[in-house]
Image (cartoon, grey):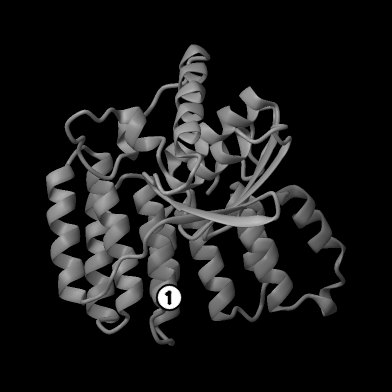
Amino acid sequence: MGTQAVELYREIPNNLRNHVSQICVLNECSHVGLLHEARTIFNEISSKTESTITTMADCLSRLFMFDEAQKLIEDYEKTNTPSIVMYMFLLSGARNNRNSNLSEQIYKQMKTLFPNVKESLAAGVVLLSNIYSSLGKHEEAKTFRSNQIEELGVKVKVGLSWTEIKGHIVHLKAHDYSHPQSTEIYAKIDRLQSKAIENGFIFDSSSMARSLNENETIESVLCDHSELLVIALNLIQEPAPKFIQAVKNLRVCGHCHEFTKVIAKIELCDIVVRDANRIHHFYPNGQCSCQDHF
């Protein structure tokens, strides 16, 4: 609700605005693409903190304004210690833009500046390898990811999603067959795929993080992600719910985001997915509250 957030911020008297309200409104602008409003508010802030600068860098990166974001970071570093969060936001934006050259440069900077921040570097490895995969360079992605993760000596977090079914919390991972209703879950996924295709939905291979194995299809790989499985689990309950909630420990991928919009429209239900970054509310009209700025 970016416009409403800006309007509410403007109602706050100047002497009551602080770094918390500034971060909140800049973050809202960032997530809905309100670049002009973000620039105006940012320029009005007389005492900029690391957090306000970081949030503005995120806003610029999300809109692929990489030169401006890098200039902001460079100016900050003239008098401050570098912040890895700023670089992660920059890398995330480059990943969304499938800009492999810029992403490689950013990751190399991160390794030089933050050699001991292993977890964040591992997240950077995943982002960069996903870019290679989105460009069809699956072997390069696999080799890069394997080598870098081994060098860092860390484990990549397994993607999990949680939901509540009849008062019990259920968690599933991608391609999970452990649930007693797995047969029904995957049958529901298949029916949703067919209906989506009938409505013109295209399964985009650029969202795949690896090459296909024997007997696999693009649809089978993409539609077995954990959040889709827990959504399907909800939909096979009797009666089928009109409101579904799920939590995911990683960021939702582009395909799952698009497919969940289609599912909400097909099933005429509201689906709320809390991923690692934000809350997505998918409406029965096929739209998401994030307006695709995630």
- Would residue 92 appear left or right of 209 to someone viewing this image? right
Left or right: where does residue 226 sit relative to residue 45?
A: left
Query: On the rendered structure, is 88 left or right of 293?
Result: left
Q: Residue at x 45, y 56 (%)?
A: 160
From the viewer's side, name the closer residue of 7 and 148. Answer: 148
Residue 149: quarter of image: bottom left
Name which residue lies at 31% across and 32% down: 205
Tally of numbered tags: 1
Residue at 59% in and 73% down? 52
Q: Nearer the viewer, residue 264 or 279?
A: 264
Where is residue 288? Give x, y as percent.
63, 39
Residue 54 location (% of width, % of height):
51, 70
Q: Is residue 254 left or right of residue 270?
A: left
Query: In terms of depth relative to the viewer, which is nearer, 132 or 259?
Result: 259
Q: Amino acid at mark 1?
A: Asp
Whether residue 34 is visible, yes or no, is: no
Q: Quadrant of residue 146?
A: bottom left
Asked which secondary structure carries label 1, the reply is helix
Viewer can see residue 120: yes
- Mark 1: few/some/many CA within 10 Å (<14, 14-19, 20+): few
**Viewer-nearest residue: 96 or 69:** 96
* Residue position for label 1: 75
Which residue is farthest top? Answer: 198
Residue 21 in percent (x, y) is at 73, 71
Q: Is residue 63 above or below residue 119?
A: above
Residue 261 at x, y percent in the picture: 58, 33
Q: Residue furthest front?
A: 180
